[in-house]
Amino acid sequence: MHGHHDVVAGPALWPAIPVAAVALLHLAGVVRLHRRGVRWPVARSLAGGAGLALLAAALVVPRTGFVAHVAGHLLLAMAAPLLLALAAPVTLALRALPTAGRRRLLGVLRSGPVRVLTRPPVVLALELGGMYAFYLTDLFALAHAHPALMALVDLHMVLAGLLLSVVLVGRDPLPHRPGLVGSLLVLLVAAAGHDVLAKVMYARLLPAHAGSPDEIRLGAQVMYYGGTVVEVAVAVVLMATWYARTGRALARERRRAVRTATVPAARPARG
Amino acid sequence: MDTTTERPAATGRSILAGVLIGVGVAAFIDETVFHQLLHWHHFYDGSTLEAGLVSDGVFHAGGWLAIVVGLFLFADLHRRGTTVPKRVWAGGLLGWGLFQVYDGLFQHKVLGLHQIRYGVELLPYDLAWNLSGAVGAVIGAVLLFGPARPIAARP
């Protein structure tokens, strides 16, 4: 390996610090709720822990070679954000914070910028725009030459992935969350955009200087199929959520139907 | 409740679930059998137009989404007892057949995505691919007509 082709970042441990800080905050929130006698669902804690672990692993393990880089990208930008969105971090924070902090957080969540950032077209532009700019232009080589730029790119990928996951399957309440059909369309555009990018990388051997042609082709295929795995997982979560919600509505409807059919006859017997 | 006539909403949902599952199965067979197991199809064969890459990306993503959504819709119809099996088959065969013909004629030929197989006389493969799809679509279209009942209304 030589020069700026070198993708070895060295054993940089500092990216693990913010991840560990978030993990500690998460833990503190769960402990505080527990002391108050409120049970925070274990599944959510597990999702949060797993998401943060994937994030730390992807940031700390050196991404040697293009295939490893793509694998890291899949974890950072897709798998970890999905798990973090399922952990409902905002709900946890709102419940665990004292009143003043809760008011401040609510103020931020209701502010104009947050409302704009969670609009589907904005989310898609950030997600796909960031990825296309990174993999198809010189930004890839530049970021590998300048660690600070790479850290910014990583941060963008995590946050954009998180926004997309939050809008599609996040367990936190969100104003203007798209309905089922809208969510599926957003997922289709994001998934198709990801697949097209991987094929363009394969066909045009981009990013330039990322490795040998064989490495780039293999990396592009890992991106294509690995992305599909996460996209299918998002689709399953989205549909399972819909299935459970409509199931509850159906059960209510059936109970009401049973009640209206039996109540007039049952009342005299009870009284 | 009238059990002899089908309710239009449930019928439409049965067809929709069928179409989604059909498209999903076609995409699934294409990916697993022809790309991964037989290695007849190529990931990219150098002759693909830009539009081919986009169309392929949309249908690869759409196929997987379709099968997930279709199966959940089917499960929902079943728990309500409103599945109309004949219409599910109609939608399924239509979805599979039309996707197969779209893939065989438009994506392979017009957009030059890739061919069914390389290093062989293509005509029999193309005929088998597109005719099987067309026959499936025709049978599906025929099943859209005539009487059909939801499962709950069956004796």
Image (spheres, helix red, strand yellow):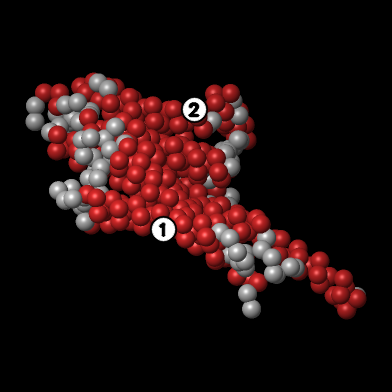
Q: Could you give the CA–CA distance between mark 2 and mark 1, rounded to whole angstroms? A: 43 Å
A75 lies left or right of A173:
left
The amino acid marked with disc number 2 is: Val
- Please say if A117 is above or below A72: above
Q: Chain of mark 1?
A: B
A268 lies left or right of A173:
right
The amino acid marked with disc number 1 is: Val
Residue on which the image places disc 2: A122
A198 lies left or right of A261:
left
For the point 56% across and 52% down, which residue is it?
A242
Residue on which the image places disc 1: B135
Circle 2/circle 1 CB separation < 8 Å: no
> Disc 2 on helix, strand or loop?
helix
> Disc 1 on helix, strand or loop?
helix
Q: Which residue is at the front of the view, B27 or B144?
A: B144
- Please say if B52 is above or below A40: above
Quadrant in the picture for the N terminus of chain B: bottom right
For the point 38% across and 55% down, which residue is it?
B133
Q: Which residue is at the front of the view, A17 or B143?
A: B143
Q: Which quadrant of the figure has residue A3?
A: top left
In the image, which is nearer the foreground, mark 2 or mark 1? Answer: 1
Q: How many marks?
A: 2
The answer to whether residue B128 of the structure is visible from this angle is yes
Task: Kindly give the residue lying farthest to the left in the view shown.
Answer: A1
Q: Find residue B80 and report its horizontal and vertical position in percent.
A: 62, 64
Q: Chain of mark 2?
A: A
Q: Residues within 10 Å of mark 1 (few under 14, many from 20)?
A: some
Q: Which quadrant of the figure has residue A136?
A: top left
